[in-house]
Image (spheres, grey):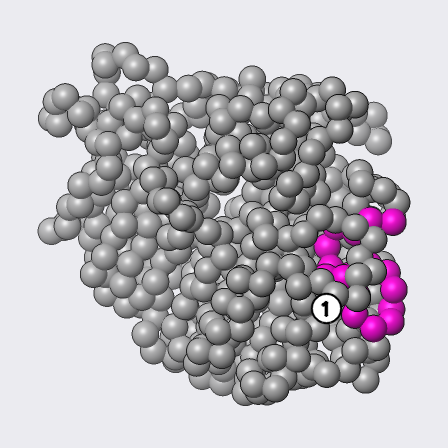
Amino acid sequence: MSLPSLPGRRALLRGSLAASAALALPAAGSAPAFARSGRPEAKWGVQTGDVTHDSGLVWVRSDRPARMIVETSATESFRLPQRRHGPLLGPGTDFTGTTRLRGLPAGEQIHYRVRLADPDDPRRSGEPVTGTFRTVPARRREGVRFVWSGDLAGQGWGIDPDFGGYRIFEAMARTDPDFFLFSGDTVYADGPIQATAALPDGGVWRNITTEEKSKVAETLAEFRGNFRYNLLDEHFRRFNAQVPSIVQWDDHEVRNNWYPGQRIADTDGRYTEKSVDVLAARARRAFGEYFPMSTLRPGDREGRVHRVLRQGPLLDVFVLDMRTYRNANSTGDQTVDPQGILGREQLEWLKRELARSRAVWKVIAADMPLGLIVPDTGEGAQHVEAVAQGDPGVPLGRELQIAELLRFIKHRRITGTVWLTADVHHTSAQHYQPSRAAFGDFEPFWEFVSGPLNAGAFPASALDGTFGPERVFVKAPAAANVSPAGGYQFFGEVDIDGGSGELTVRLREQDGTVLYTKRLRPGLVGQ
């Protein structure tokens, strides 16, 4: 069914947010000028990230050098605001910056506004840009609701104003989420956006274009331009001002199916830089500049994407990085594979944090699926890109590391684990059961897939039987690279009830229509 148009707890805020977040569209591909005339402007909107019970990160980008100033209030009128001076925004961070808000009340709606002041004359400041977010509740009875998806502007399908742009963000906002889990492929740095693309019905998809999106990203400026491109969409900017994010990355922030140490073939004339490690370092820097992340902030010496975000008594979110520490893509038939897809250090971190968690539910945010076969067609027909390698027998290759983790969860009797992912450009629900599996030393669990947000949709991936998955729901096209105009754009919703502790997953279409619902009971090791 379609979402009802009922007002949620943020409904009264949306009128003012729309006015402040839907700013005049920045000129396509525009970069800040160093001219000091006029006042600084925040045309790319505001966003918040990694919100806790008493803190949060606020992000902004200026159109010129400016001092970031953030005011917060318990009311939309900003009576008796608290002011915090943030960083000086300059070319070193592409004029982006974040300010950490501390000492916030738990479980409360926080209103904030960002002013950008001329660094030479603080009296000269631009119009404030406002936003809101809700801090993590301290009490279980308040419940938690969030949405997740991934894959934005892929396969050449960018912002088409005639289609309505990234309108899926409006449907996600209507669910009134506490946060958005952005499950990777936040940009397609390897996917140029052309002015037009032909549609099967004879129509034409008309993209907004920029200089940085006209080719594959290689320079730092081009990677930055990829993140800036998505902020040209008014729906995305408005959503960012209303809903805090928890962001992870996957491959397309750098290049399709990349892994550390990879060299790009000389025959690939799109790239003059052949070292993927060099590209990844530039992409990682831009990624940290354009998303407010607690563990990857500009200037940090040792940043990381993997982290745990504690969302109160009901939920901990374990954000994985299945890209930075993986071994090379291969046929995946090794009988010994200590590095795997997570790397040993990240695996041990995940074990420790899962064992420490006292939350009712432990959502494991994976940027790639476990039992769905994802081939690496660029490396060779038999190479695999994710975990599953197509052999339904005992664990081999990267499956060995996942088997170790699943065994650990069982033997430590860790309850309430649920896996969420995107990546494969369709939506599905898989139940993993040891009685069906070649490897049986684990407790049953669920994996839910959603996406894309605005990208090509693809047929459903085949399953690998090693961990006994059964696909109980799937919606995917029969053809490859179906445009957003053809449908098959998805997001997922998780709603945890504060009274019963039950967790409900809803897989939704682009307009918010519910396709599939699964309710899980709390306190079980496996179900």
Foreground residue among 487 and 336? 336
Q: Magenta stretch mostly in which secondary structure?
A: loop
Q: In this picture, is 305 found above or below 336?
A: above
At 71% from the left and 62% from the top, the residue drawn is: 337
At 66% from the left and 74% from the top, the residue drawn is: 404
* Left or right of residue 293: residue 454: right
Callout 1: few (<14), some (14-19), or many (20+) C-alpha neighbours within 10 Å?
Answer: many
| Disc 1 element | helix
> Circle 1 sits on which residue?
400
Q: Is residue 317 magenta?
A: no
Q: Is residue 394 magenta?
A: yes
Q: Position of residue 91 (x, y in %)?
A: 34, 24
Foreground residue among 279 and 209? 279
- Quadrant for residue 514, please give it: bottom right
Q: Position of residue 167 (x, y in %)?
A: 58, 41
Let me know if residue 260 appears in the view.
Answer: yes
At 56% from the left and 42% from the top, the residue drawn is: 186
Q: What is the span of residues highlighted in magenta in the rendered image?
A: 382-398
Q: Position of residue 84 (x, y in %)?
A: 17, 45
Let me know if residue 232 appears in the view.
Answer: no
* Left or right of residue 59: residue 232: right
- Quadrant for residue 257, please give it: top right
- Quadrant for residue 55, please give it: bottom left
At 63% from the left and 31% from the top, the residue drawn is: 275
Task: Tell me the kind of residue under disc 1.
Answer: Leu
